[in-house]
Image (tube, rainbow, N blue to C red):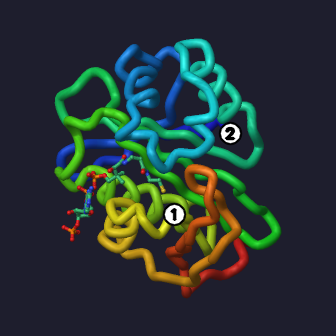
Amino acid sequence: MMIALDNPLEFEGGSIRPLKPGDVHAGYVDGLNDPQVNRYLVGVRQSVQSTESVMQFVRQNIEAPDAALFGIWQAGQDQHCGTIRLHAIERIHHSAHIGVCLFDRRAWYKGMASCAVNVLTQWALETMHLRWIEAGMYADNLASEKTFLAAGYEWVYDVQDKYLFEGRAAAAKVYAARNRLWQKPS
Ligand SMILES: CC(C)(COP(=O)(O)OP(=O)(O)OC[C@H]1O[C@@H](n2cnc3c(N)ncnc32)[C@H](O)[C@@H]1OP(=O)(O)O)[C@@H](O)C(=O)NCCC(=O)NCCS
């Protein structure tokens, strides 16, 4: 969906803002094809990504009524180093899913992902009046689990066997952030 923001959402060391097709750069495409980056990104791994496929993804997210894709910019950099996305945004339950990826491995281990998750989560709970935002991850993806924990998410449940990882049934975990003071917007 088209998100109108007056200013990027800032955190220490960086910021996020809605991603546009013109933001797509070679480092974004190459990063998505990096096996260390896409190890747990099952959808991304289904085909080799190209500038066109990535631009199409960006456009689809702008057009979708239930998704919002943001880029993550490290302070002082022109090109974004990652993405963070709300999807499966649900109007009845006021809920959504969230996913994050730093496709540029040089940006890892600086606290960027957890800060980006935190700032988008707070913004979405307040501005989009969501009451529940959940993140699903393979149980093996310790970096993802620690990122959502550091961003204030709480473990909700584990799922055994539902998802395949490299052809075998694997365990997944679901974490959520909630607005416990949520009231139906008037
Ligand atoms: C997961 C990912 C977003 C983490 O990004 P990051 O900016 O390096 O994470 P942060 O620096 O915010 O770190 C948050 C916590 O995770 C820990 N962490 C980060 N990478 C880790 C790793 N590879 N192994 C173990 N712990 C890790 C940090 O030490 C930190 O822990 P702390 O709060 O106890 O200090 C990044 O590794 C990535 O993009 N991976 C590929 C895409 C992916 O798997 N996305 C998640 C899909 S569910």
Q: CA distance from mark 1 to mark 2?
A: 24 Å
Q: Quadrant of the N terminus?
A: top right
Asked if residue 148 lies left or right of residue 97, the reply is left
Of pointers 1 and 2, the one earlier in the residue sequence: 2
Is the CB atom of the residue marked by disc 1 within 8 angstroms of ligand 1's nearest atom?
yes
Q: Residues within 10 Å of mark 1 (few under 14, many from 20)?
A: many
Task: Tell me the tag on residue 166.
Answer: none
**Residue in the image at 66% along x and 21% along y:** 56
Residue closest to the far right: 92
- Decide: is 117 above or below 45: below
- Answer whether residue 6 is visible to the viewer in this image: no
Task: Tell me the tag on residue 137.
Answer: 1
> Where does residue 130 sit, x and y in percent of width and height?
63, 68
Q: Nearer the viewer, mark 1 or mark 2?
A: 1
**Residue in the image at 37% along x and 35% along y:** 103
Q: Amino acid at mark 1?
A: Met
Q: Residues within 10 Å of mark 2 (few under 14, many from 20)?
A: some
Q: Nearer the viewer, residue 121 or 3?
A: 121
Q: Amino acid at mark 2?
A: Met
Callout 1: SS: strand
Instruction: Give the labeled residue for mark 2.
Output: 1
**Residue in the image at 62% along x and 41% along y:** 43
Instruction: Locate residue 95: give its quadrant.
Output: bottom right
CB of mark 1 within 8 Å of CB of mark 2?
Answer: no
Q: Nearer the viewer, residue 119 or 85?
A: 85
Instruction: Locate residue 169: give its quadrant.
Output: bottom right
- Decide: is 49 above or below 6: above
Callout 2: SS: loop
- Decide: is 179 above or below 58: below
Instruction: Locate residue 164: give its quadrant.
Output: bottom right
